[in-house]
């Protein structure tokens, strides 16, 4: 008889989002080897996740034919709600991505039908692999934050908004179903406006007790 698996300690809990700074993402990526095939692959996965806003399931399902380097577009066939969408990645991820594409060819992993991100024996990389990888790398980098694939998506959205990108454009880039979803998403991610408002308020001083 099979024993039931214990539920994870965070099941049913919701934590405040913790978007990463560019320096924190750089520190995490720096933990990946630049020479080992797995390190080259992991760097490419993290860079592409960070600079495209893809969900982890969308990222791991990609095939090389889904990417068009000419316009940095990504064909996502099964996005949230099983919707097909076209997304994009920022050129910042080009170097890491191209290095992995070259490496997978060298390793003989570029056979027809193979996923973009594979194990060294050609099997697909599981979603949980990236989740666990980010936790390990974040611990080594000493970020002090909960780091997970969706957190890279959070960070991408916050950076776009801080750079002045219109919410309608961010909505398209994230693959959201509507601008209203994106507005709620961004409100959930950052309390910058509330924090700035607090700094302008003059509160009465406390009277010292005798």
Image (tube, rainbow, N blue to C red):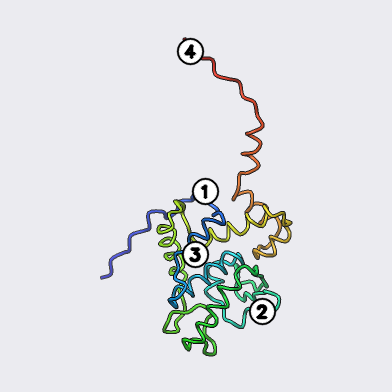
- Residue 167, quarter of the rendered image: bottom right
Q: Tell me how far mark 3 sits from mark 2, CA to CA.
A: 24 Å
Residue depicted at x 43% and y 54%: 142
> Which circle marks residue 29 in the picture?
3
At a point 48% along the width and 12% down the height, the residue shown is: 209
Name the residue rendered at 63%, 34% in the picture.
198
Q: CA distance from mark 1 to mark 2?
A: 35 Å
> Residue 130 in the image: x percent, y percent?
46, 68
Residue closest to the far top = 210
Along the line of sight, the residue nearer the viewer: 144 or 7: 144
CA neighbours of label 3 inside 10 A, class few (<14), some (14 to 19), many (20+):
many
- Mark 1 burial class by Cα count in 10 Å: few <14, some 14-19, many 20+: few
Q: Could you tell me residue 170's position as x and y percent?
A: 69, 60
- Mark nearest the camera among 3 and 2 is 3
- Locate residue 2 relative to residue 46 in the image: left or right: left
Q: Of circles 3 and 4, which is in front?
A: 3
Q: Between marks 3 and 1, how big is the CA–CA gap?
A: 23 Å
Q: Rate crowding at label 2 as few (under 14), some (14 to 19) or many (20 or more) other CA atoms within 10 Å.
A: few
Which residue is under mark 4?
A: 209
Q: Is residue 112 above or below residue 148?
A: below
Q: Earlier in the sequence, mark 3 or mark 4?
A: 3
Residue receiving disc 1: 16
Q: Considering the image in quadrants, where does the N terminus appear?
A: bottom left
Of tags 1 and 4, the one toward the viewer is 4
Q: Do callouts 3 and 2 mark residues in contact (Cβ within 8 Å)?
A: no
Residue 87's disc is: none
């Amino acid at each position: 008889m099979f024993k039931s698996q214990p539920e994870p300690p965070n099941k049913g809990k919701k934590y405040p989002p913790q978007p990463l700074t560019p320096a924190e993402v750089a520190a995490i990526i720096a933990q990946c080897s630049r020479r080992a095939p797995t390190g080259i692959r992991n760097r490419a996965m993290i860079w592409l996740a960070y600079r495209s806003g893809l969900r982890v399931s969308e990222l791991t399902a990609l095939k090389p034919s889904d990417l068009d380097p000419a316009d940095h577009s990504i064909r996502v066939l099964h996005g949230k709600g099983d919707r097909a969408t076209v997304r994009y990645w920022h050129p910042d991820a080009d170097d890491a991505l191209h290095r992995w594409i070259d490496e997978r060819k060298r390793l003989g992993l570029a056979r027809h039908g193979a996923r973009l991100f594979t194990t060294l024996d050609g099997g697909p990389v599981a979603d949980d692999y990236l989740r666990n990888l980010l936790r390990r790398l974040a611990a080594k980098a000493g970020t002090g934050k909960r780091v997970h694939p969706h957190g890279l998506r959070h960070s991408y959205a916050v950076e776009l908004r801080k750079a002045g990108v219109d919410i309608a454009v961010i909505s398209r880039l994230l693959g959201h179903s509507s601008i209203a979803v994106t507005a709620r998403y961004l409100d959930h991610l950052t309390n910058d406006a509330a924090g700035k408002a607090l700094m302008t308020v003059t509160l009465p001083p406390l009277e010292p007790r005798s």
